[in-house]
Image (spheres, rainbow, N blue to C red):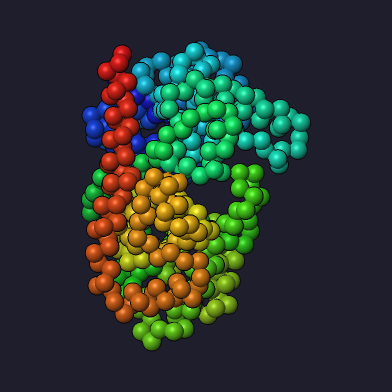
């Protein structure tokens, strides 16, 4: 049985495709024509030659006007999906399938509350409101004809519009990172060698590849209380560490990525910690995954909610990291259907500083954590999570 997986936001489906193929499933990744360049498969593997024959470039769109136009041309949709017996998708996939008089087997939403299910308050123009109304109508029609909706986030905010439209979800997540590839020496180019050399000069490497977004915040319909990444908490915490440490063995590595790069550099200069901070260019995931082998502490986000792709990357490589979750252990397990992994959980700069000072004084205390985090990832995401998808696919095949 051939399985088509439509869309690749956050690399999720490329990871799933590879895990499924490892499980013996004949899976293929179907790319939307408007995939973000950053999330192209070539940026997520050094072994693209191994996987490219299982990657199909479609002319379908994740959403917006191009998706609506294609909805009314079912023959052009069928061209891409007719070869597949089982289809998984995000974006406008449910609507595409119902347009072809087929069911989407699994919907894997990447937007809080589900793609196109919300009313968008920021849409002022008549054309935009009408467009969204049609997207929402056809999406709901498609979801009512979808076998499963998988979303790990069981919070009221995420499930509200599913429940409002009488759509049932299953608390199953998405494999976020494929951690089964071992890069060869040839994959470490001169740029990476220079970074690894710089990291080698520090006794404690603190690495943050989160988008710098803490001052210039966008207005989001999906999250009225959005606070950005709050990266300034990390910068101030690191500066506090520099001011209190006699050894100053830690170095902070940041990526020039995000709208607040300039503001972050200004803050670093104001705090007089420039010599302890190394700036790196924006990098692909495949490069970051190599660097994580040389990182002692990761630094993620401090907005109080679930971590994103960068956090999953730390977990997949067993890197303990700073992150802030404004939620109890019990509530987290209820919402996300899994235990909280170890992390340095705080949104206070003073506490961040204390964590670094403690690590500096007792580095061996944290050695066991790396293996535990890798085990946690492979159990709650990665390999074991992919097996849940494989089981659903095989059960479907047995019924045919």
Tell me if residue 128 can be seen.
Answer: yes
| Front-lying residue, 289 or 298 | 298
Q: Residue at x 43, y 47 (%)?
A: 334
Q: Residue at x 48, y 57 (%)?
A: 327
| Front-lying residue, 347 or 46 | 347
Residue 344: percent from the left, percent from the top? Answer: 40, 65
Q: Quadrant of the N terminus?
A: top left
Quarter of the image for residue 22 reads: top left
Q: Residue at x 31, y 34 (%)?
A: 388
Residue 218, above or below 382: below
In the rendered structure, the answer to whether residue 138 lies left or right of residue 29 reads right
| Front-lying residue, 200 or 205 | 205
Q: Quadrant of the C terminus?
A: top left
Residue 38, above or below 91: below
In the rendered structure, the answer to whether residue 217 lies left or right of residue 194 reads right
Tell me if residue 188 can be seen.
Answer: no
| Front-lying residue, 78 or 137 | 137
């Amino acid at each position: 049985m051939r399985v088509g997986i439509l869309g690749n936001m956050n690399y999720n489906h490329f990871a799933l495709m590879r895990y499924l193929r490892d499980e013996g499933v004949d899976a293929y990744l179907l790319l939307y024509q408007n995939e973000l360049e950053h999330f192209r498969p070539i940026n997520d593997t050094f072994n693209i030659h191994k996987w490219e024959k299982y990657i199909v470039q479609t002319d379908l769109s994740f959403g917006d006007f191009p998706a609506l136009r294609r909805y009314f041309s079912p023959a052009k949709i069928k061209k891409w999906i007719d070869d597949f017996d089982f289809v998984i998708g995000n974006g406008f996939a449910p609507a595409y399938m119902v347009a072809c008089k087929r069911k989407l087997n699994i919907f894997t939403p990447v937007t809080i509350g589900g793609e196109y299910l919300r009313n968008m308050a920021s849409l002022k123009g008549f054309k935009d409101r009408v467009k969204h109304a049609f997207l929402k109508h056809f999406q709901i029609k498609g979801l009512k004809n979808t076998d499963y909706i998988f979303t790990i986030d069981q919070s009221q905010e995420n499930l509200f519009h599913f429940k409002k439209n009488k759509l049932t979800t299953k608390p199953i997540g998405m494999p976020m990172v494929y951690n089964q590839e071992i890069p060869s020496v040839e994959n470490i180019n001169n740029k990476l060698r220079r970074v690894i050399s710089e990291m080698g000069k520090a006794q404690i490497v603190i690495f943050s590849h989160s988008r710098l977004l803490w001052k210039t915040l966008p207005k989001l319909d999906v999250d009225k209380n959005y606070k950005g990444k709050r990266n300034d908490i990390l910068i101030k915490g690191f500066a506090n560490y520099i001011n209190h440490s006699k050894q100053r063995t830690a170095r902070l590595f940041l990526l020039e990525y995000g709208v607040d790069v300039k503001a972050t550099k200004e803050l670093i200069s104001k705090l007089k910690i420039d010599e302890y901070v190394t700036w790196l260019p924006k990098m692909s995931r495949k490069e970051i995954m190599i660097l994580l082998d040389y990182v002692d502490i990761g630094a993620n986000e401090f907005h109080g909610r679930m971590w994103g792709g960068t956090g999953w990357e730390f977990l997949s490589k067993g890197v303990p990291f700073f992150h802030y979750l404004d939620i109890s252990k019990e509530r987290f397990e209820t919402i996300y259907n899994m235990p909280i992994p170890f992390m340095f959980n705080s949104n206070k700069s003073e506490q961040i500083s204390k964590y670094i000072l403690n690590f500096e004084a007792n580095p061996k205390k944290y050695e066991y954590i790396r293996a535990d985090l890798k085990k946690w990832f492979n159990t709650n995401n990665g390999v074991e999570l992919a097996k849940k998808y494989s089981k659903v696919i095989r059960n479907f095949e047995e019924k045919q």
